[in-house]
Image: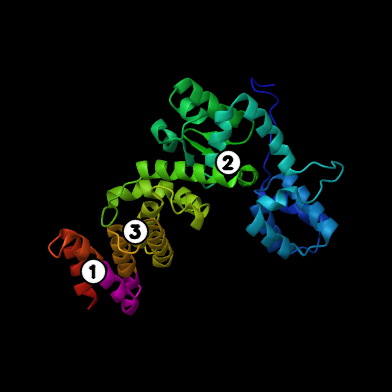
Amino acid sequence: MTALGTTVTVPVLPRGEAMAMLAGRFPAMDPVVADRICALLGDLPLAVEQAAGYLDQTGTPPGEYADLLAGQLGDMLDEGEVTDRPGMTVAVLWELSLQRLRGECPAAVELLELWALCDPEKIPLGLFAEPARFDDGPLKDAAGNRARWAATTGALVGYSLARRDQDMVDVHRLVQAATRRAMSPTVRTARAGTLVRLLRGILPEDIMRNPEAWPVWRVYLPHVIAVLGHTGADDATIDGLSWLCDRTATYLQEHAQPAAALTLFHRALAIDEAVYGPDHPEVATDLNNLGLALWALGRAGEALPLVQRALAIAEAVYGSEHPSGQTIRYNLDQLD
């Protein structure tokens, strides 16, 4: 027993052993497909058993099942049964822990909801060090008190919902999927908004030709990408979301990932146009950055009208002598 109740220990298998569990039930399964299924399930024995039960019960081709896991992991947590344990699924397993935590340590549930929107590995606890950026509630109160914060993180480790290594935590991808599935759209948007504020507070803004800023971005990039992946068009009004898209795109562009950068520059522009309208200075900045990204990809023909529009907005708002307009004009001259 722990102070909060019975701990559910969830071991993880070496990949070869997890694949052997599937091979024992389905000898003809392509090892590449088996490896993909086990990777998606995080090598969790119960989940692999559940997957085998689903494949056996439904006759679904393994490759198709792997695609279902990749696209709808949360929806698949209830599918399939474990031999000799009717009704036992991954979803049931973690819901028992979450039910106890909701009653005993609601701050821990809120923290797990934040972790569920991050990358599963190496989540820096330092990201959560600023209580002022949390929404009002149990977690904000806990984050402002060292003893309560230690108890909050300790509860999640104690229930085997996370694994801590010094100042980092790992959360099993199925724990994340189960937690996300239990969140309402309103809660998910609120948690994403908290993470955007936390990330904006810790990530350097000055990125271009500034190697000193890159190590921090390198640590947090997987979590930034995960958070952005869990926000959608309906979340455009999250404060700082456009900034995070734009700065992440700039970092990716600086590190020779122009295609990924382009997608995020487009997204920053779409957010600001939706929030501010088509003639706002933020939109001018987005247009300029998107145009330069297209130009770097050799698509000057597409870049030119975007930067021209950016210049027109900047001059309409600030006048022709303002530094913002002059910077955009300089960029436009490079495109001509």
Left or right side of 282 for 224: right
Residue marked by disc 1: 312
Query: Image point 58% across, 47% down: which residue?
Result: 185
Q: CA distance from mark 3 to mark 1?
A: 23 Å
Q: Nearer the viewer, residue 322 or 302?
A: 322
Tell me which amino acid carries mark 3: Thr
The secondary structure making up most of the magenta span is helix
**Residue range (magenta):** 294-311
Residue 239 location in percent, x, y?
Answer: 40, 47
Left or right side of 107 for 46: right
Tell me which amino acid carries mark 2: Val
Mark toward the start of the polypeptide (2 vs 1):
2
Q: Secondary structure at mark 2?
A: loop
Relative to 121, say whether 137 is above or below: above
Left or right side of 210 for 125: right
Q: Secondary structure at mark 1?
A: helix
Residue 232: tell me if it is visible. no
Residue 197: tell me if it is visible. yes
Relative to 139, say whether 247 is above or below: below
- In which quadrant will I find the C terminus? bottom left
Residue marked by disc 2: 171
Residue marked by disc 3: 250
- Which is in the foreground here, disc 3 or disc 2? 3
Residue 58 location in percent, x, y?
Answer: 83, 59
Tell me which amino acid carries mark 1: Ala
Q: CA distance from mark 3 to mark 2?
A: 28 Å
Mark toward the start of the polypeptide (3 vs 1):
3
- Which is in the foreground here, disc 3 or disc 1? 1
Residue 33 location in percent, x, y?
Answer: 70, 62
Query: Image point 27% across, 59% down: which residue?
Result: 281
